[in-house]
Amino acid sequence: MSAYREHANVAVLHEQLAAIEAHADTLAAAAESYRDIPEVAGPLYERVVAEQPENARALVSLASAYWLHGRGPEVVGGLAARALAADPMHRGAWHLWALTESNPRSRVTRWEQVSRRFPEDDLARANLADNAASLAGAEHDPVALGLALDTYKALRARATTDEQRAVLDGAITTLSGWRW
């Protein structure tokens, strides 16, 4: 598999992956090294999920590989739903579930749910703020704008570096100046 980084031949890669005789746990461990290469991680996690269909971590990892590979929200959302059914507290499954919603208003609602479920999850809060700001801009929605501002301000209060504070200050200043 490491040769793939040099030759980038997907057909050869898939032949090599298919030839691996290993248990699901071994395949999952091997796939971890290639999480950033979905054409490697995907086939490995497909085999793990085939052997362990209730393995929430493997389902999320497969969904992530599919997302990075461009498989689309329907397939990824289905895997996220399966992962949530297997482990309702799997944060990655919740993130993918929210991410795959195509309707902007519904996506904001999903990020709100994730943020409530995991109150310390700043990535979920950032996604909530970003999606609410996008919705506010697209639909001139003052409620969504207020949600975006409140969420960015909450993130600002939790920021730990000057760089984070500066970025959040910029977003807050920009959104505070919006008038319709």
Image: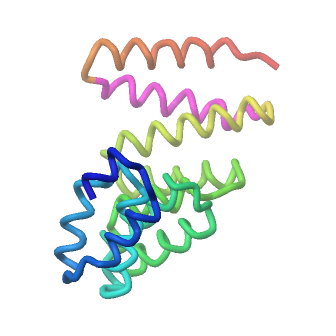
Q: Quadrant of the N terminus?
A: bottom left
**In the image, residue 127 lies at what x, y percent?**
50, 41
In this view, the residue in front, 141 or 64, is 64
Horizontal relation, residue 82 to residue 53: left or right: right
In this view, the residue in front, 135 or 11, is 11
In the rendered image, the vertical position of residue 168 relative to residue 59, given as above or below: above
Measuring 37% from the left and 60% from the top, which residue is drawn there?
A: 40
In the rendered image, the vertical position of residue 1 relative to residue 6, given as above or below: below
**In the image, residue 146 lies at what x, y percent?**
62, 31
In this view, the residue in front, 179 or 27, is 27
In this view, the residue in front, 28 or 174, is 28
Prevailing secondary structure class for the magenta stretch in the rendered image: helix
Residue 65: image quadrant is bottom left
Q: Which residues are the magenta region?
A: 141-159
**In the image, residue 80 lies at what x, y percent?**
47, 69
Measuring 40% from the left and 76% from the top, which residue is drawn there?
A: 46
Is-magenta flag for residue 61? no
Colour scheme in the image?
A: rainbow
Residue 87: image quadrant is bottom left
**In the image, residue 84 lies at what x, y percent?**
42, 73
Is-magenta flag for residue 153? yes
Measuring 48% from the left and 28% from the top, which residue is drawn there?
A: 152
